[in-house]
Image (spheres, grey):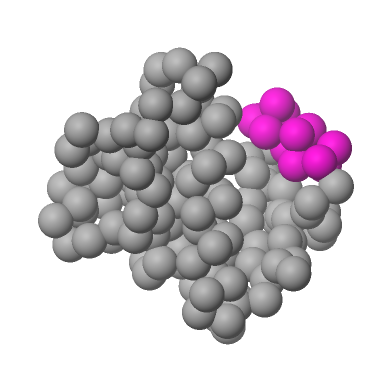
Amino acid sequence: MHPTGRTRYRLATDEDQEQIRNFNQQDGEDPGWPTVVAERDGEILGYLATHRQGDQIMAGPLAIKEGRNRGVLALRICQAYENVLKAIGIVSYRFYIHAELDTWHRMAMRSGLFEYEGMVEDHLLFRRDLK
């Protein structure tokens, strides 16, 4: 795979909200700040939003359009998201993976990058410390 440089990873703007709402994972609620999007030729290919749970920063939802190289796109969105968090002084965040998404939670556990914190209802909870 050779990156073409056509995909931009950036913070979402108000103008992006309609495209973000069109993702089937989005429940109609506007994503919190920061939200990082992957955009190519004016089309949003994916995003990673933020929501707060008490005083904790929770990453999610992560949504990627169907197509080739979804894993690479997800990885790069996550890297851009972490760069934003580091720039604003956030030192850790948490995220959930639905228990049925076994490929994703196996990757998270095997990577060594995330601390598994247990089950919450039907989701696995992970923590990521930023260094």
Q: Quadrant of residue 75?
A: top right
Q: Main secondary structure of the magenta part?
A: helix
Query: Over which residues does the magenta segment extend?
Result: 100-111
Say whether residue 97 is magenta.
no
- Answer yes or no: is residue 3 visible: yes
Q: Residue 12 in the image: state x and y as whole percent.
A: 29, 58
Q: Position of residue 97 (x, y in %)?
A: 64, 44
Q: Is residue 32 above or below residue 95?
A: below
Quadrant location of the N terminus in the rendered image: top right
- For the C terminus, which image quadrant? bottom right
Residue drawn at (50%, 79%), measured in percent from left and top?
Answer: 88
Residue appearing at x 45%, y 16% in the figure: 68
Describe residue 131's horizontal placement relative to residue 47 as left or right.
right
Question: Measured from the top left, where is residue 114 in percent x and y?
Answer: 78, 53
Q: Position of residue 101 (x, y in %)?
A: 65, 30
Q: Does residue 31 appear in the picture of this structure?
A: no
Residue 103 in magenta?
yes
> Residue 130, relative to residue 37: is it above or below?
below
101 on left or right of 13: right
| Location of residue 57 (image quadrant) | bottom right
Camera-nearest residue between 119 and 18: 18
Q: Number of numbered discs present?
A: 0
